[in-house]
Amino acid sequence: MGSLNIENVKKAFGPVEVLKGINLEVTDGEFVVFVGPSGCGKSTLLRVIAGLEDSTSGRVVIDGEDVSVTPPAKRGIAMVFQTYALYPHLTVKNNMGLGLKQAGTPATEIDRRIGIASSMLSLEPYLQRRPAELSGGQRQRVAIGRAVVREPKLFLFDEPLSNLDAALRVNTRLEIAQLHRRLKATMIYVTHDQVEAMTLADKIVVLNAGRIEQIGGPMELYNSPANEFVAGFIGSPK
Ligand code: ADP
Ligand code: MG
């Protein structure tokens, strides 16, 4: 299971309100993409869902349970960042397993999950290497693998392809799409790239200055943008 309800979520940093009342329903297994210009609040919304930021008001509900004050580690969420956020001194294997180890998962179970994830992500040859010995694409696959082994209800991706060159971006995007098909997990994916949004999403959420401009399937937004902002950002030329 991995449904998500965001109910009138607002977030202010001091006097500046960066989320101005977000309402969103995500059903189990959906691939939802947040798009919008830099600074519109995409990362903040993702961080509120993950519990890395507290909202100023509103509720975050996962599988029917209000998790608004639940600590990040207890929300059943795994997040993948643009910068990978790997530990340089740990091997690939230990980077992937650290969270499970800290949660008290038995070593045999950790190994089993790392085996499955590293096979899915073609990481078997690299398990004993350290991040510095890997390419950017391999590092991002390790970060994705670390999320997979946690078997989260919800995957959150914050611009995971932004630091990769063009060819790797396409490759890694296809791998994420394949992972979604295999795991049938709920995924929320932030990007400012229209092509990523159009190709990955079941549903696109267009954000602008802390508000949702439109929610819809890729073709729906493309063919019937609700306003000029959506048209300019994603819609077909008028
Ligand atoms: P996006 O991910 O869409 O580029 P962000 O969610 O990172 O946008 O940021 C939205 C706005 O909130 C920006 O104006 C940013 O400067 C501001 N902001 C984000 N995090 C903080 C913070 N910790 N303190 C103050 N302002 C912040
Ligand atoms: Mg961001």
Image (tube, grey):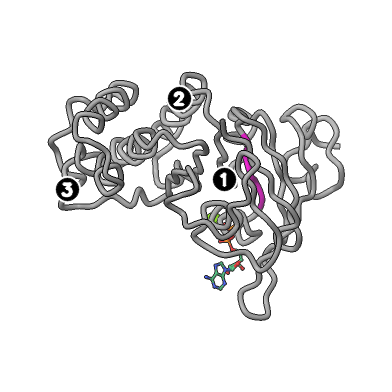
Distance from disc 2 to disc 1, alpha carbons, whole Å, reads 17 Å
Mark 1 CB near ligand 2 (8 Å cut): yes
Numbered disc in front, either 1 or 3: 3
Residue at the location (47% across, 57% down)? 71
Q: Is residue 85 above or below residue 122?
A: below
Q: Is residue 214 left or right of residue 162?
A: right
Q: Which residue is mark 2?
A: 179
Distance from disc 1 to disc 3, alpha carbons, whole Å, reads 28 Å
Q: Are marks 2 and 1 in contact (CB under 8 Å)?
A: no
Element at label 2: helix
Magenta stretch secondary structure, dominant = strand
Checking the image for residue 90, the label placed there is 3
Q: Is residue 153 left or right of residue 92?
A: right
Q: Is residue 138 above or below residue 181?
A: below
Q: Position of residue 82 (x, y in %)?
A: 43, 49
Quarter of the rendering occupied by the C terminus: top right
Distance from disc 3 to disc 2, alpha carbons, whole Å, reads 25 Å
Say which label, 2 or 1, has the lower sequence index. Answer: 2
Checking the image for residue 190, the label placed there is 1
Element at label 1: strand
- Span of residues in magenta: 32-36
Say which label, 3 or 2, has the lower sequence index. Answer: 3
